[in-house]
Amino acid sequence: MAAPMRAVSRCLRPWWWWRGTGGCLFSQDAHSSGRDTHFGFQTVSEEEKGEKVYHVFESVAQKYDIMNDSMSLGIHRLWKDWLIRHMNPTPGTQLLDVAGGTGDIAFRFINYIRAQREKLIRNQLKSQQNLSWSEISKSYRHDRQGSLMGSQAVICDINKEMLKVGKEKLLQMGYSEGLSWVAGDAEELPFADDKFDVYTIAFGIRNVTHIEKALEEAYRVLKPGGRFLCLEFSQVNNPLLARIYDLYSFQVIPVLGEVIAGDWKSYQYLVESIRRFPPQEEFKEMIEDAGFFKVNYHNLTSGVVAVHSGFKL
């Protein structure tokens, strides 16, 4: 495991300034012979980045959900709800949620499937008005005992601490079916080809060393007709909001990280990683290059985040 990352400059610059410099003013020499990449505003070897990102999420895992609420003022819940409604899964859907260690997307998926199932049951019962109450009750109980009508959500995360937190939430929330947990790398998924109906990754793809490899893996494990959905921080398209967002990101979020999680450096990195992620149109092209069709995106909160969608045809 790598030693904790060195602190980087905390001065405030707008997102477009950092894109122009490529983060070079805050770089450090890589310590291995591998190719260089970025870790926030630092330049590190590709091997170092993987270790450092792992360390970040290992460090923040226990406070991850609390910090999400604090940093976004709870709005991240609305973004994730929007993602699931946009997905609109039906009973029987097989979901792979990558970098989903704490289970937020998978839990919402299961809840949505349950609601869809209940709606289906009610519609079936309405069409059976001639049945006795005893027959209706028996049918309803039988349907409720089903296993989500074949739906399954697989949560895959490379970080064991994040998976541990997710499993603890599973016990607290009382989920008993439809969920499984797998330790795995987004760049080399431990699943067969053409296995899943939907692939989701929420606030995780910007931390991957080779985004193009993660996209290729997403394409590989999806069934023909399967859907790719990515929820990620993006480029704000409102100039006033962009200035406020920069101030909040660099001046407030690391402080919250220190106060709540006792970890300034990890949240400084998370802020920087957002600024290094490709803007909407550029990321859209990367998804298309991976082979996906009908690729589009929806900006939420003026582009603070975006949901990208594509299909394997």
Image: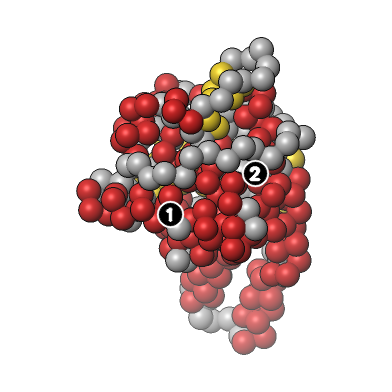
Q: Depth check: 86 or 262 in front?
A: 262
Residue 144, given in percent of the width and then of the height, sits at 66, 71
Disc assigned to residue 185: none
Toward the viewer: 193 or 235? 235
- Distance between mark 1 and mark 2 Cα atoms: 19 Å
**Residue displayed at 61% across by 20% down:** 30
Residue at mark 2: 56
Mark 2 residue type = Val
Q: Is residue 178 visible?
A: no
**Amino acid type, callout 1:** Gln
Of helix, strand and loop, which one carries label 1? helix
Left or right: 140, with 23 as reference point: right
- For residue 77, above or below residue 5: below
Q: Quadrant of residue 142?
A: bottom right
Where is residue 178? Give x, y as percent: 69, 56
From the image, tell me which residue sits under label 1: 251
> How many numbered discs, if any?
2
